[in-house]
Image (spheres, helix red, strand yellow):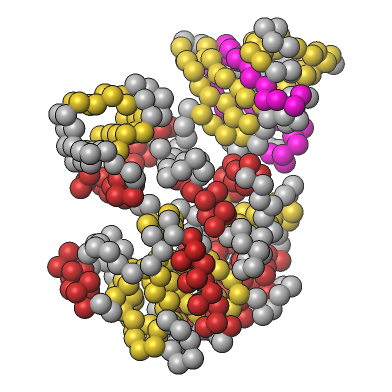
């Protein structure tokens, strides 16, 4: 379900909201938080902006990374941007793919951390372990920090252990899961980055100095940001600084890193099964079976994960689901589109979905949001026929404009400039039939674009 252009942070895995929507909701608490600052890959910008809009959240900014450079660079960019106006601010760092089921306990942990961070400490949140988990790093806590309730010195960061070692950690009571969540005073984290990883900080300063505003986004300078070393904030600062402390947090936390984690936290039937979507089963036990639309049936299996989308099926035993990463790498090596994107592809104006493809033709569904419009474009290798299913379409074709309603259609010849827009107040649904010698998405020549996508960037 998670693809390079639509990763798990954007998926509805644990509720009707996506993971990033759940994370944004988590900080909708005015007594504690300012509007969120989002750092993300530029390929995901429109999906993230739309998902935040859907839940009524206006972020302080959405900052676009041209490439991934791990968490130290992301923290540096955020801290530099915040410090430009609020030098004494505290910055809560949250990955957008975590599940937290006890949000009052989460806020209580943040409040405890605030007193330590205000005193100059770099705070990490250590999750109170519930099992000898081998997939997480651990933090060995030291003595309590004087003057701060439930705040401890960090004795050591520990890599992912064997099961036997993890059980020893649980029995000893001094180890916590490393959550990857932090509360930093921006001045202190910038000083420690300058001390330990000056190349990261210098590159991020340059990237922000050369940044440009693009619609609602802040686009970092590409060459400057690419020069930043790729290193985690744990390795860059937290494992080296004397300012690190840990706040234990019993908050119902899960790093949703595998389907087995979703089975762990989902509501189960009497046989230990989780069924989501159009699923029919018989004599199964301790399974996670999820369908995104296609009828999916299972008989006589146990401890199995089955996930079905409209273009792929994944079957694995629950204890092997983490090994899916090897299959994904093989898909990438083979150049398979399934590693990159779904058949449903999100765009700033809505989405399109591939329905059928054959020799010299393909059929798509286009859904255009109210008030949105596609780029003014032309194609050298294909013609298009549009049929309005519902809604109202305003179509520019050459020098003419046409208003189409339900069950009406129009033909767009090869090489003719054209644009589709939705002037109405409800979503516009179009069936598009493409025909021609070449039907790839790169046969788009954008002449004008509301979303700043000239030239074509496949985004």
Please name the residue shown 49% across and 91% down the image: 147
Residue 440 x %, y %: 54, 24
The residue sitting at 83% across, 15% down in the picture is 401
The question of residue 404 being in magenta is answered with no
Residue 56: image x %, image y %?
Answer: 67, 47
Q: Please provide the residue range marked out in magenta.
A: 424-453
Residue 186, compared with residue 50, is above or below; it is: below
In the figure, 137 relative to 155: above or below?
above
Query: Considering depth in this image, is 348 or 28 the residue closer to the camera?
Result: 28
Q: How many marks?
A: 0
Rendered location of residue 130, percent (x, y): 27, 64
Q: Is residue 439 above or below residue 305?
A: above
Mark yes or no: residue 296 visible: yes
Q: Which residue sits at x=71%, y=75%?
A: 86
Quadrant (top left, top right, bottom left, bottom right) of the C terminus: top right
Q: As displayed, is residue 348 above or below residue 293?
A: below
User: Does the stretch in magenta take in 434?
Assistant: yes
Residues 122 and 4: in front is: 122
| Residue 282 on image: x %, y % | 20, 26
Q: Quadrant of residue 411?
A: top right
Question: Looking at the rendering, in which quadrant would you find the N terminus?
Answer: top left
The picture quadrant where one finds residue 451 is top right
Q: Please identify the residue farthest to the right as the structure is shown.
A: 399
**36 or 39, which is in the foreground?**
36
Rendered residue at 63%/41% (across/down): 54
Q: Is residue 418 visible?
A: no
Q: Nearer the viewer, residue 441 or 119?
A: 119
């Amino acid at each position: 379900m998670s693809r390079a252009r639509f990763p798990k942070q954007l998926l509805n895995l644990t509720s009707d909201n996506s993971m990033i929507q759940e994370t944004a909701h988590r900080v909708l608490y005015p007594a504690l938080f300012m509007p969120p600052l989002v750092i993300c890959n530029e390929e995901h910008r429109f999906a993230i902006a739309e998902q935040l809009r859907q839940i009524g959240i206006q972020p302080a900014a959405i900052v676009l990374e041209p490439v991934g450079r791990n968490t130290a660079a992301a923290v540096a960019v955020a801290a530099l941007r915040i410090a430009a106006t609020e030098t004494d601010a505290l910055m809560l760092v949250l990955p957008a793919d975590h599940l937290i089921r006890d949000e009052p306990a989460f806020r209580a942990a943040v409040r405890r951390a605030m007193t330590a961070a205000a005193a100059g400490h770099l705070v990490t949140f250590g999750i109170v372990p519930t099992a000898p988990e081998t997939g997480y790093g651990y933090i060995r806590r030291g003595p309590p920090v004087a003057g701060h309730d439930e705040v401890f010195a960090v004795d050591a960061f520990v890599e992912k252990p064997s099961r036997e070692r993890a059980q020893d950690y649980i029995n000893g009571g001094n180890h916590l899961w490393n959550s990857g969540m932090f509360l930093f005073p921006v001045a202190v984290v910038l000083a420690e980055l300058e001390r330990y990883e000056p190349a990261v900080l210098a590159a991020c300063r340059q990237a922000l100095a050369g940044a440009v505003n693009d619609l609602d986004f802040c686009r970092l300078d590409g060459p400057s940001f690419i020069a930043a070393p790729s290193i985690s904030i744990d390795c860059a600062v937290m494992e080296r600084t004397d300012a690190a402390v840990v706040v234990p947090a019993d908050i119902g936390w899960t790093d949703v890193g595998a389907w087995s984690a979703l089975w762990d936290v989902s509501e189960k039937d009497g046989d230990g099964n989780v069924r989501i979507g159009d699923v029919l089963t018989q004599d199964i036990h301790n399974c996670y079976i999820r369908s995104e639309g296609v009828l999916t049936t299972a008989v006589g299996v146990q401890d199995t994960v089955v996930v079905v989308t409209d273009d792929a099926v994944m079957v694995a035993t629950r204890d092997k689901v983490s090994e899916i990463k090897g299959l994904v790498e093989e898909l990438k090596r083979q150049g398979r589109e399934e590693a990159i994107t779904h058949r449903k592809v999100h765009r700033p104006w809505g989405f399109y979905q591939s329905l059928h493809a054959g020799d010299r033709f393909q059929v798509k569904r286009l859904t255009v949001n109210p008030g949105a419009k596609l780029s003014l474009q032309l194609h050298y290798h294909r013609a298009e026929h549009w049929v309005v299913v519902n809604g109202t379409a305003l179509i520019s074709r050459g020098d003419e404009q046409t208003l189409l309603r339900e069950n009406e259609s129009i033909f767009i010849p090869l090489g003719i400039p054209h644009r589709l827009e939705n002037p109405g107040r409800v979503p516009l649904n179009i069936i598009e039939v493409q025909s021609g010698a070449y039907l790839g998405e790169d046969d788009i020549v954008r002449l004008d674009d509301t979303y700043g996508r000239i030239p074509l960037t496949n985004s």
